[in-house]
Amino acid sequence: MKAGHQVRRADPSYPLSLSFTSLAHWTAGTAVDAQGLDRRRLTRRTRVHAAVGRRFVDSVRTGEGRQALRRCLDPFFEEYDVLLTPALARRSPRSAPWHERGWLRNVLANTNYSPLTPPWNLTGWPAMAVPFGTLPSGAPCAVQLVGRPGAEAGLLEVAAQLEERRPWKRTAPLD
């Protein structure tokens, strides 16, 4: 990119425990949100998600999984200022009555569709999805920018440079 940046291929050391940590946080959050609600009024899939999450609420509250993830990923930002990844791993799944599908089928679809954003949601470090061109079909696509704690201004600057060099096509009506 002709904006004064040096771009190199690099891979953060995602820990093997990442999938488990992500699932624990995702389901525990649902369990906490569902507390006090009439479970009979929740979809079966949501009831299962919350039931799985109840097993993890206490361990998630300790923050050990997040801290371990931060320790594992922190060295990446000792060498690099910004991580650039695809925002999504594949095209959007087809529209379907997802509420009628089983819990595991939905979890697998979600994790296969968006595996690159959860690590950064868990760390709490700055990350953002930025529109970046279109697929051959014309569908919009995006990249994810990630930085070390406190790097929000730098990420916004990179996003502005990307927009300047590849203006974002407006797809919504102007009104």
Image: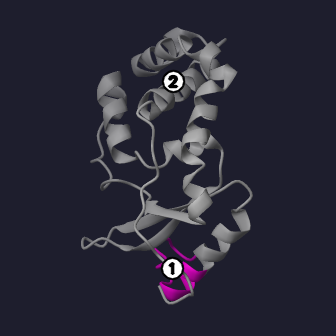
Residue 108 against residue 3 in the figure, above or below = above
Magenta region: 161-175
Dot 2 falls on a residue whose secondary structure is helix
The quadrant in which the C terminus is found is: bottom right
How many marks on residues? 2
Image x and y of residue 161, in percent? 58, 82
Residue 122 makes an appearance in the image: no
Residue 122 against residue 167 in the figure, above or below = above
User: Which class describes the residues within 10 Å of circle 2: few (<14), some (14-19), or many (20+)?
Assistant: many
Q: Amino acid at mark 1?
A: Gln
Residue under circle 2?
A: 24
Image x and y of residue 160, in percent? 62, 78
**Overall secondary structure of the magenta section:** loop
Q: Measure the alpha-carbon separation of dots 1 and 2.
A: 36 Å
Of 123 and 39, which appears nearest the observer?
123
* Picture quadrant of residue 157: bottom right
Q: Residue at x 29, y 40 (%)?
A: 96
Residue 89 makes an appearance in the image: yes
Q: Horizontally, is 23 left or right of 104 in the view?
A: right
Dot 1 falls on a residue whose secondary structure is loop
Q: Which mark is residue 6?
A: 1
How does the figure colour the protein chain or chains?
one colour
Residue 94 against residue 104 in the figure, above or below = below
Residue 38 against residue 143 in the figure, above or below = above
Of 166 and 66, which appears nearest the observer?
66
**Is residue 17 covered in magenta?**
no
Image x and y of residue 137, in percent? 25, 70
Q: Amino acid at mark 2?
A: Ala
User: Which class describes the residues within 10 Å of circle 1: few (<14), some (14-19), or many (20+)?
Assistant: few
Q: Nearer the viewer, mark 1 or mark 2?
A: 1
First of labels 1, 2 by sequence position: 1
